Amino acid sequence: MELSRKLLAIKPSATMAITAAAKAMKAAGEDVVGFGAGEPDFDTPEFIKAAAKEALDKGLTKYTDAAGTLELREAIVKRYEEEYGLSYSADQIVVSNGAKHTLTNIFQAILNPGDEVIIPAPYWVSYPVMVQMADGVPVHV
């Protein structure tokens, strides 16, 4: 199989290089604070683990609506209204698995070859690559 020219033009991830270096230093016994992949330095809290196990036991293991389950989006609407005084409807809420994934989807959907995307500095090192993969041109400001 031949890889795409787009992929071959992308440089290796600086984030993953930093993360690998920090892990190697930790393995060598050095006291390191990693500023790479953004993983927390603590285990997932027990109440989250328990909720995940409960969801599995209830059979909540199937695909959900692409925007997230209605119940979750309604809970977000309620939280934003109670905590911030903001009013939304569930159809205005989209739940994703992270900003980078969401931005990648957006760039793929809206960019045409040569479209410029303003990226304010400082920025996550992945953003310019995500724009380039969608045939856009990153413009750093």
Image (spheres, rainbow, N blue to C red):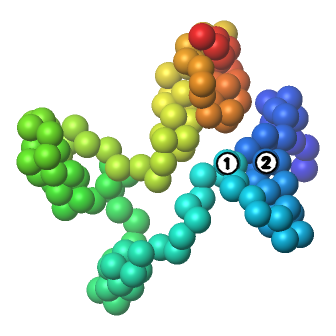
Residue beneath the point at 83% across and 65% down: 30
Q: Mark 1 points at which residue?
A: 35
Q: Mark 2 points at which residue?
A: 18
Callout 1 amino acid: Phe
Quadrant in which the C terminus is drawn: top right
Q: Is residue 25 above or below residue 8?
A: below
User: Is residue 69 or residue 83 the one in the foreground?
Assistant: 83
Q: Which residue is drawn at 82% across and 48% down?
A: 17
Is residue 54 found left or right of 111 in the rendered image?
Answer: left
Residue that extends furthest to the bottom in the rendered view of this protein = 57
Look at the picture and state if 33 lies above or below 126.
Answer: below
Q: Please state which of residues 21 and 129 is positioned toward the viewer in this rendering.
A: 21
Image coordinates of residue 39 in percent, x first then y, are: 60, 59
The answer to whether residue 121 is above or below residue 102 is above
Q: Is mark 2 on a helix, strand or loop?
A: helix
CB of mark 2 within 8 Å of CB of mark 1?
yes
- Which labelled disc corresponds to residue 121? none
User: Amino acid under label 2?
Assistant: Ile
Reading the chain from its start, which is encountered first: label 2 or label 1?
2
Q: Is residue 80 left or right of residue 69?
A: left
Mark 2 and mark 1: Cα distance apart in space:
8 Å
Give residue 72's quadrant in the image: bottom left
- Pinpoint residue 20: horizontal percent, then vertical percent: 82, 57
Where residue 11 sits, quadrant-wise, is top right
- Left or right of 70? Residue 119 is right
Query: 85 left or right of 30?
Result: left
| Front-lying residue, 100 or 60 | 100
Provide the secondary structure element on which disc 1 rests: loop
Residue at image x 64%, y 11%? 139
Q: In the depicted view, which residue is nearer to us: 33 or 116?
A: 33
